[in-house]
């Protein structure tokens, strides 16, 4: 028998969900990306140290309890909360099964963890994009060689890195504050690190604070300044987490938003909005204008090259789906490590070093790669379907803010499918 119960009926399930995520983190050190709930709950979980079998049984019991509560048919916040807890719990069960040794295909894992099916992009699609790119690149030799030669002219010198990044962050923050406002207590610390498989990371610490880290293992190209400033900071992860904490965790008392399970559907929204947020903050030609006038000169680069650089950058952005196909082949066993690296060199136009770094990322984060590109496309389609098009920037900001302040998840973005490419 099911019943429609008030919002408070979900509170005990939400508390159990938080403790479940913390408990999974004892078996999987990457699982808990952020926690700023009651310290006693972490202590309680540390003492109990439940085995995986008990955690699976507990998660399934929570799902049964949720099933007894009728989800409202409307799309109000209570309905979204019910959906969020249900899908996050199902994802937690899948992750626990993986920790037990259960093997999913790339496609099965992507849906089980992230609530989305990744489209298939085949070699002929990438060949077509690379052929278009070839026409834009100067010099002689293969497209990959000319692309690498072209890119090396746009590396930010180490001594100018912090100045360029701080300038990009200030601009992204100013644009975000003007459009949607930010909590009064929001702030971040910026660090430069090495020996990581990722290029940037936001560690949200609660109370409006983030630690943003930039990996300097490999040369950093000029486009990464705005990309990382927006993606990790404004209006990306830092703003997303700040708004969820302010409006859901604090104002509504929804404790499930005091914890962030990395391998969960929430990450597709987090990464997708962080990537799409770059376009939201810099509509049309505004990014090119800002970089030509500020970042290129600060980095000692020729401002007259800005437009051509971003024409090339736009085409290579489509090649990001090559990362998914490398992960698909590598995780499904149809590509060896060496073949996955070769694929990334051929179709993502990566250097050998970057390709090796990317496969190390896949070793740890597996199908997580879909969250960046598929997430961005799903978010874009959802916001544009609601009127947030590039020629209506105020509506775009309005819809973007609503999305990052709500518990909506990937299955709730299904305004249209992202087509597969052949």
Image (tube, rainbow, N blue to C red):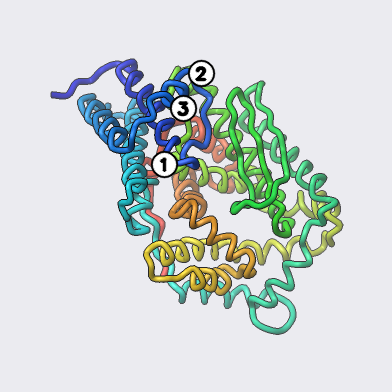
Q: Earlier in the sequence, mark 1 or mark 3?
A: 3
Give residue 257's mark: 3
When the figure is inspected, residue 122 is found, relative to residue 364, above or below; the finding is below
Which residue: 86% across, 57% down? 300
Q: Earlier in the sequence, mark 2 or mark 1?
A: 2
Image coordinates for residue 161, horizontal then vertical, percent: 79, 50
Q: Residues within 10 Å of mark 3 (few under 14, many from 20)?
A: many
On screen, residue 123 versus residue 134, left or right, reads left
Give me the residue at 51% from left, 18% from top: 250
Q: Could you tell me which quadrant the C terminus lies in? A: bottom left
Q: What residue is drawn where x is 50% and y is 65%?
A: 322
Which residue shows up at 41% across the image and 41% down it? 264
Disc marking residue 250 = 2
Spatial CA distance of label 1 from label 3 is 13 Å
Earlier-in-chain disc, 3 versus 2: 2
CA gap between label 3 and label 2 equals 9 Å
The quarter in which the N terminus is drawn is: top left
Which residue is denoted by mark 1 in the rendering?
264
Tell me if 328 is positioned left or right of 136 in this view: left
Query: Residue 55: x, y in percent?
Result: 31, 33
Per the model, the C-alpha gap separating discs 2 and 1 is 22 Å
* SS at mark 1 in the image: loop
Q: Nearer the viewer, residue 392 or 344?
A: 344
Q: Secondary structure at mark 2?
A: helix
The percent position of residue 124, horizontal first and vertical second, equals 46, 76
User: Could one spot residue 49 in this view of the protein?
Assistant: yes
């Amino acid at each position: 028998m099911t019943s429609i119960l008030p919002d408070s009926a979900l509170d005990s399930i939400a508390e159990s969900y938080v403790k479940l995520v913390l408990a999974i983190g004892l078996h999987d050190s990457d699982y808990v990306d952020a926690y700023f709930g009651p310290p006693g709950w972490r202590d309680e979980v540390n003492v109990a140290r439940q085995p995986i079998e008990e955690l699976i049984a507990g998660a399934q019991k929570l799902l049964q309890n949720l099933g007894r509560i009728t989800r409202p048919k409307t799309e109000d916040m209570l309905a979204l909360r019910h959906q969020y807890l249900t899908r996050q719990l199902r994802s937690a069960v899948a992750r626990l099964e993986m920790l037990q040794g259960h093997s999913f295909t790339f496609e099965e894992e992507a849906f089980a963890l992230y609530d989305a099916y990744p489209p298939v992009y085949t070699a002929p699609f990438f060949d077509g994009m690379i052929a278009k790119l070839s026409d834009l690149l100067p010099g002689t030799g293969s497209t990959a060689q000319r692309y690498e030669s072209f890119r090396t002219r746009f590396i930010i010198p180490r001594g100018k890195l912090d100045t360029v990044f701080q300038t990009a962050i200030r601009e992204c923050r100013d644009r975000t504050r003007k459009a949607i406002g930010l909590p009064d207590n929001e702030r971040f610390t910026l660090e430069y690190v090495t020996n990581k498989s990722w290029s940037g990371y936001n560690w949200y610490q609660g109370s409006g604070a983030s630690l943003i880290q930039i990996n300097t293992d490999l040369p950093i190209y000029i486009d990464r300044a705005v990309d990382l400033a927006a993606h990790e900071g404004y209006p990306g992860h830092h703003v997303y987490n700040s708004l969820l904490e302010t409006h859901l965790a604090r104002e509504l008392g929804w404790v499930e938003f005091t914890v962030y399970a990395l391998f969960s559907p929430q990450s597709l929204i987090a990464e997708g909005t962080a990537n799409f947020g770059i376009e939201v903050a810099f509509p049309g030609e505004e990014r090119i204008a800002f970089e030509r006038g500020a970042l290129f000169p600060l980095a000692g680069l020729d401002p007259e090259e800005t437009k051509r650089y971003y024409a090339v950058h736009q085409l290579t952005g489509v090649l990001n789906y090559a990362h998914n196909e490398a992960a698909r082949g590598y995780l499904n066993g149809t590509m060896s490590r060496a073949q996955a690296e070769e694929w990334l060199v051929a179709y993502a136009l990566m250097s050998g070093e970057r390709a090796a770094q990317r496969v190390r990322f896949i070793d740890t984060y597996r199908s997580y790669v879909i969250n960046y590109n598929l997430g961005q496309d799903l978010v874009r389609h959802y916001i544009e379907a609601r009127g947030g098009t590039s020629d209506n920037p105020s509506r775009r900001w309005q819809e973007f803010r609503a999305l990052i302040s709500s518990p909506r998840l990937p299955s709730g973005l299904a305004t249209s499918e992202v087509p597969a490419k052949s």
